[in-house]
Amino acid sequence: MSINKTDCVFLVVSSSKKTYQNLSETYSAIEPPTWALLLAQSTRAAGFNVKILDANAERLNEEEIFVRLKEINPRLICLVTYGQNVNTGTTIMSGATHISNFLKENKISQKICFIGSHVQALPKETLEKEKSIDFVFTNEGVYAIQNVLKLKDFDNANLRDIRGIAFRESPDKIKINPPEKVVPNDRMDIDLPGYAWDLLPYKNRPLDLYRAPLWHAEYDFEKRSPYASLQTSLGCQFKCSFCMINLINRNDDEEVGVASNYSKMRFWSPDFIIKEFDKLIKMGVRTIRIVDEMFLLNPKYYKPLCEKLAERNKDDSLRMWSYSRIDTVKSPEILKLVRRAGIKWLCLGIESGDKKVRLEVAKGKFEDVDVREVIKRVHDADINIMANYMYGLPGDDEKTIEKTFNLSLELCTAGWNTYPAIALPGSLLYKQARESNLQLPDTYEGFSFHAYETVPFPTEKLTPGQVLKFRDDNFIKYHTNKNFLKLIEEKFGKEASENIVQMAKVKLKRKLIERENLDTK
């Protein structure tokens, strides 16, 4: 271990200009790099000198990144390609590989490694395709990064003994080493000891280079920054076929990882995680995202944390959101506690308005619930809802999608989002699609939900282009619906509804819609 020299720089990049098209400049969020923060904190707690270079937040181009890396002169460059949303781990690979290629072409001397969901899913394929990457981590990487940094040299002879990585043993041979363990639940507070907030860039005050999704800020641009996001748990106990979140738990050396094989959850203690909230509150951050896939699942952890947050939110200044399943939002008393804690939005995965489709998406034992009653219960607790739907799930056709959209109009939630179902690398859908020789994206951007090159999963009755067309058309229909805009104006004011109308004018371009000539139909 070195004392003064930087051992590792965690480099964060983005491809948002391509993946979000014209939404990127004004409307898309700029997320704090949660996993870079976790890895930086755990690595320096183990005695290493690390830095974070967030080129996404600082809007650095490739030349500026190169200059900054030369100045830092780290032993190792680690591109962190985890995404805050499930699909972005693959789409970020576009920007990340562009940078790694640029660095190699300009003769940077350091080894370049990648950590993130895409390389966890496809370690061998990634290294075969991307010659600028020297090695990748095959799960969350906490212990593997520390073991790599203990090496004097990062040559192949030394890398052979590092568990939890894949590397290029020769120009034509990729070796996937045995897996490294993930941080066990009883070591979470110790071996993943929080976030390296102090390593993030800022302009005038901490976290002011980051901005929340517009809906999270109540459709008010002024409330978007400063913005932070953090996790109170890792992973998910369910096995949704379209999701790849559990790749962080990977414990095998297969060439294609499937997230549903690694379903598990780990938690920080409430006493530990409240200290991270205290740091953010002290820095003046009030707009906060709780990233957990299933925050309201285990009352042993979320109840005492919400009680501690409620003590700090007596002025109701916190503006937070978290995820929940629609079949776990049951108790009015819990919802009141959640609201007092400052959680003013719940993101609920409704997925489909058709019961048969909804029950086929492999959400563990997804109970058949009364969606309307759940929504009413959350609204009665003075909590807004970001309703998530999916088009193109198995069994979907034009009628089921229409049924889903009509349900969303009836529910009239303050947030509405619909994803086209995509076979994301690391999901069971992806492996099935490969085995069935179904059409998959041939670019990283193709796995984005908003890109020109997006390629959704087809259904028996719908082409990928039709799925996209329904999604994009209904996004505009919902956000210009008079009942929805009236709700927004009543809750958040006239300016908020006007901001939504302007956002709805931004139309995404889609290659598949153009190719299938669907715009004229």
Image (cartoon, helix red, strand yellow):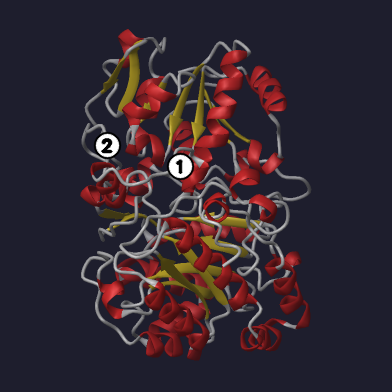
Q: Is residue 336 visible?
A: no
Seen from the viewer's position, the closer of residues 290 and 313 is 290
Which is more N-terminal, label 2 or label 1? Answer: 1
Left or right of residue 122, residue 482 in this image: right
Q: Residue 160 falls in which quadrant of the image?
A: top left
Q: Where is residue 37 in the image (x, y as percent from the top left)?
A: 52, 42
Mark 2 residue element: loop
At x 48%, y 32%, the residue is: 44
Give neighbour class at mark 2: few <14, some 14-19, many 20+ (Cα, 10 Å): some
Residue tagged 2:
256
Identify the amino acid type marked 1: Thr
Identify the amino acid type marked 2: Val
Q: Position of residue 295 (x, y in %)?
A: 39, 66
Q: Is residue 83 visible?
A: yes
Seen from the viewer's position, the closer of residues 184 and 274 is 184
Location of residue 483 with respect to 462 vertically, above or below: below
At x 45%, y 34%, the residue is: 45
Q: Position of residue 284 (x, y in %)?
A: 68, 60
Location of residue 449 with respect to 491 vertically, above or below: above
Residue tagged 1:
90
Q: Where is residue 409 in the image (x, y as percent from the top left)?
A: 52, 84
